[in-house]
Image (cartoon, grey):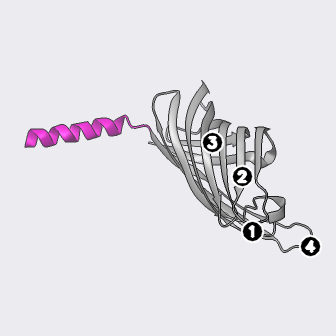
């Protein structure tokens, strides 16, 4: 029994020592005023967890929620809650001592309470600033792919789009802790 227990302990220590798990995510808050309307406060919390398969490849997911994102301009007066899940595969194309350039490929699902469901599939380029072996600051800029929004209430319009989105509104910044 002692030998079995010691073997299990050694296996757990070996796996833990070589584990390549990372956690992190991003969060945001904003206040927007459109014309003469009252200002709307929006927020989102997007935790992230992933596993590094090897030096170049990783898999992970973002699961989060928020409040305040309008689906369309017609919905700008509605302050809706959202739920989002976005699994991805990450390929690190360029690696230096302090900076890594990568591409996340995956899909996402976002539910706007009582308004719509949004599906996307595509690529998100990104960069990681490695402060040390444990902490990285990660930024994504843009999106290349396909997005569809299916309205779930009467009188709303659904939409489909594909292409490249590289504007300043599609920038995210987060922190990852590497274990």
Name the residue carrying label 4: 36
Q: Which mark is residue 149?
A: 2
- Asked if the residues shown at circle 4 and circle 1 are in contact, with their CB atoms under 8 angstroms apart, the answer is no
Which x, y percent locates residue 167?
81, 43
Q: Residue 10 carries which label?
A: none
Tell me where residue 32 sits by quadrant.
Answer: bottom right
Q: Dot 3, how many residues are within 10 Å of its Cα: few (below 14), some (14-19), or many (20+)?
A: many
Q: Which of marks 2 and 3 is nearer the N terminus?
A: 3
Secondary structure beneath disc 1?
strand
Using the image, determine if residue 175 lies above or below residue 117: above
Using the image, determine if residue 176 lies above or below residue 52: below
Secondary structure beneath disc 3?
strand
User: Over which residues does the magenta segment extend?
Assistant: 1-20
Of badges 2 and 3, the one in the foreground is: 2
Secondary structure beneath disc 4?
loop
Q: Dot 4, how many residues are within 10 Å of its Cα: few (below 14), some (14-19), or many (20+)?
A: few
Of badges 3 and 1, the one in the foreground is: 1
Which x, y percent locates residue 65?
60, 60
Quadrant in which the C terminus is drawn: top left
Name the residue carrying label 3: 138
Q: Earlier in the sequence, mark 1 or mark 2?
A: 1
Q: Distance between the residues labelled 2 and 3?
A: 27 Å
Q: How far apart are marks 1 and 2 (CA)?
A: 23 Å
Query: Could you tell whether 94 is left or right of 145 in the image?
Result: left
Q: Which mark is residue 41?
A: 1
Q: Earlier in the sequence, mark 3 or mark 1?
A: 1
Q: Distance between the residues labelled 4 and 1?
A: 15 Å
Residue at (76% x, 54% y) in the render: 158
Of badges 3 and 4, the one in the foreground is: 4
Identify the main secondary structure in magenta: helix
Which x, y percent locates residue 79?
73, 69
Q: How many labels does the image show?
A: 4
């Amino acid at each position: 029994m002692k030998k079995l227990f010691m073997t299990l302990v050694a296996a757990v220590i070996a796996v833990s020592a070589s584990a390549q798990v990372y956690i992190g995510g991003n969060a945001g808050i904003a206040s927007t005023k459109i014309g003469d309307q009252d200002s709307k406060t929006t927020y989102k919390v997007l935790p992230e967890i992933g596993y590094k398969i090897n030096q170049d490849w990783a898999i992970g997911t973002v699961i989060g929620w928020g409040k305040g994102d309008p689906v369309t301009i017609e919905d700008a007066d509605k302050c809706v809650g959202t739920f989002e899940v976005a699994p991805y595969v990450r390929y690190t194309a360029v690696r230096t001592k302090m900076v890594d350039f990568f591409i996340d490929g995956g899909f996402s699902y976002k539910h706007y309470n009582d308004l719509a469901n949004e599906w996307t599939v595509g690529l998100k380029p990104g960069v990681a600033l490695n402060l040390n072996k444990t902490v990285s600051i990660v930024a994504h800029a843009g999106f290349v792919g396909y997005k569809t929004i299916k309205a779930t209430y009467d009188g709303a319009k659904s939409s489909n789009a594909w292409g490249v989105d590289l504007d300043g509104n599609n920038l995210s910044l987060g922190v990852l802790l590497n274990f």
